[in-house]
Amino acid sequence: MALTPEELTAMLLSLKVAAVAVAFSLPFGIAVAWALSRRDFWGKSLLNGLVHLPLIMPPVVTGYLLLLTFGRRGAVGAFLDEWFGLVFSFRWTGAALAAAVMGFPLLVRSIRLSLDAVDRRLETAASTLGAAPAWVFATVTLPLILPGIAAGAVLAFAKAMGEFGATITFVSNIPGETQTLASAIYTYTQVPGGDVAAMRLTLISIVISLAAVIASEVLSRRMAARIGAA
C-alpha cells in the first residue's frame, strides 16, 4: 500500500501538527487541570465550561472563532503578525492551534481526574515538612499523575490527528501547507476516482488512532504499576 508523495506529505503534516499541538498545550493543560481540581475561585464553573466548549460546539464554529481571533485581521492575530511575525491563518501553525484547541478538553479532563484521585494527605504531609507548594507539586503530585498526563496527551494527539472541521475553516485545505490526513480524505472523496486513495488514507488514520488509544492504555497501566511499586 504505497503512498503517493501528496498522501505522504499529508500524513507527515498530520503527525507534525498533532505533535506540536500536544507539546504546546500540555503545560496549559496541567495548569488548568490543577486549578480546576485544587482551587475554588469565582468563575470556576465558567472556566470549566469554556474548557469543554470545543467538545460540544460544532467544529466549524470553533474554527470560525479562531479565524476571527487569530486571523491576520483578528485582535490577537494582527498583534502577533505585526510584532512577532507569527501568522496562524492559512498556515500549518494554525492547523496546530486548531488541533490543540479541539484536543484540549480531553487533555484537561484526563489530568484532572488523576489529580482528583491523588491522596491529598501526601501533599499535606510534604507541606508540613516545610516543602514549598511548587516543590510539593514537582516531587509528590506530578509523579502520581503521570499516568493521567500520558493518557491525556495521547488522546489529545489522536484527536488532533483526526481534526477536520475547525482546521479547514481556520486554515483551509492547502496541499503541502495545511492539508492534513482528514482534509486529504475529504478532497479525495470529492473527485472522480479518488475512492481508493480516500480508503487508503482512512485505513492509515484508523491504524494511527487505534495505536494511540492502545498506547495510552498500556502507558497508563505501566506508569500506575511503577508508581504503586515505588
Image (cartoon, helix red, strand yellow):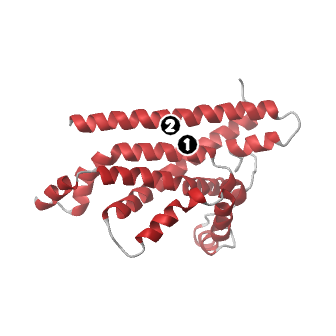
Residue sitting at x 27%, y 51%: 118
Measured as percent of width and height from the top left, residue 54 is found at: 57, 59
Q: Can residue 65 be seen in this view?
A: yes
Q: Which residue appears at 32% of the width and 53% of the height?
A: 115
Q: Residue furthest top?
A: 1
The image quadrant where one finds the C terminus is top left
74 vs 22: above or below:
below
Question: Residue at the spot x=55%, y=62% of the render?
Answer: 53
Residue closest to the far right = 192
Name the quadrant of the N terminus: top right
Q: What residue is at 50 percent from the left and 50 percent from the top?
A: 22
* Image mark for residue 213: 2
Q: In this view, does 41 lie above or below 222?
A: below
Q: What residue type is labelled 2?
A: Val
- Asked whether 130 or 144 is in front, the reply is 144
Residue type for callout 1: Ala
Q: How far is mark 1 from mark 2, CA to CA?
A: 7 Å
Whether label 1 touches label 2, CB < 8 Å:
yes
Q: Is mark 1 on a helix, strand or loop?
A: helix
Q: Position of residue 78 (x, y in %)?
A: 64, 73
The residue indicated by pointer 1 is: 158
Relative side of 110 to 52, left or right:
left
Residue 147 percent coordinates (x, y): 36, 42
**Residue 90 shows in this picture:** no
Within-10-Å neighbours for mark 1: few <14, some 14–19, many 20+: many
Which mark is on residue 121?
none
**Element type at marker 2?**
helix
Say above or below: 110 vs 228: below
Return the disc, 1 or 2, that comes first in the chain's sequence.
1
